[in-house]
Amino acid sequence: MNPQAGIMACYFRSWRDIATGDLGNKVSMRELPDEVDIAFVFPDGNEPADYWKALESDIIPALHKKQIKVVRTVAIDELIKPGATANDIFQRFFSSTKGLDGLDIDIEHTLTDSQRKQAEGISLELKRLLGQGRLFIYDTNENGDVSLLRSLESQLDFVLFQAYGQSPGSVQGHYDRMFKDFLVPSKFLVGFSFYEERSRGWGDVLQPIESSTAYAYASWNPSQGTKGGIFSYAVDRDGVKEGDDTLQPTTFEWTKALKKLL
């Protein structure tokens, strides 16, 4: 990962990795190109044990050889459950898989005061358990809990903003409303989505690439300064046309091209 350049981060849907053994899958996370800086492990909970073995023994080492950091995503629900502890979360989602480089907490709604207090305390402890040199990231959307993000800002490496189906102008508005008083642009990454099979589609990757929302996000910066970078969701669908539900291999040409703009 080169901190001097704009960050290219990617969420890879774990259930679509060939390491699951699903013969319909066509892509491996280990194939991500050198242009990627952070790869997010994004499971749906149904991945078999063989996938987790392959992640630890094969996929993570292959990505590390390309200088790609590998981070596990965890839903905020895990932090606000009654009786939740940082030690348990750390064990289940981080230390149980050797080689991970950090944790990413996904929050897409506001919390009650008691939930926010619990989430903040657990987050601070997770940061301590991760220690120096590992990444601690939050990802959110326009409905995320700004108060929690503000309280944790000093402990976070990046805040990722899901701007699927939007535009640079709307992202600027969200940044002004949610982040400008506490988050420096260099810690802010804006995200688009590739087309997920059998989904509504966000329209972020309409071809040609030069007129796409993804391209616009890569080229855009907040008025407050240079952004930290961009990220994609469902990078395993890189290059697939909007509306094409066929599972297919990819050479990640969009990711490579967008990285050059950062």
Image (cartoon, grey):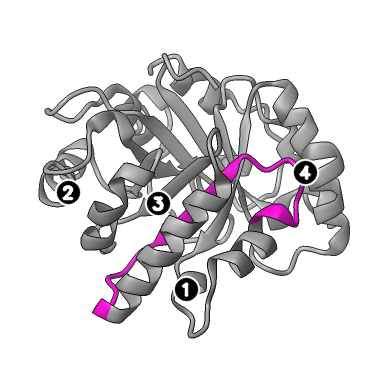
Report if residue 76 lies within the magenta region. no
Query: The magenta stretch spans which residues?
Result: 94-113
Residue at 55% across, 38% down: 134
Q: In this view, does 215 lie above or below 109?
A: above
Q: Mark 1 points at which residue?
A: 77
Earlier in the chain: of badge 4 and badge 3, it is 4
Q: In this view, does 70 lie above or below 103?
A: above
Residue type at mark 2?
A: His
Q: Name the residue under label 3.
A: 139
Q: Nearer the viewer, mark 4 or mark 3?
A: 3
**SS class of the residue under badge 4?**
loop
Q: Mark 4 points at which residue?
A: 26
Seen from the viewer's position, the closer of residues 243 and 64 is 64
Asked if labels 2 and 4 touch by Cβ distance under 8 angstroms, the answer is no
Earlier in the chain: of badge 4 and badge 1, it is 4
Earlier in the chain: of badge 2 and badge 3, it is 3
Q: In this view, does 148 lie above or below 66?
A: below
Asked if labels 2 and 1 touch by Cβ distance under 8 angstroms, the answer is no
Q: Name the residue under label 2.
A: 174
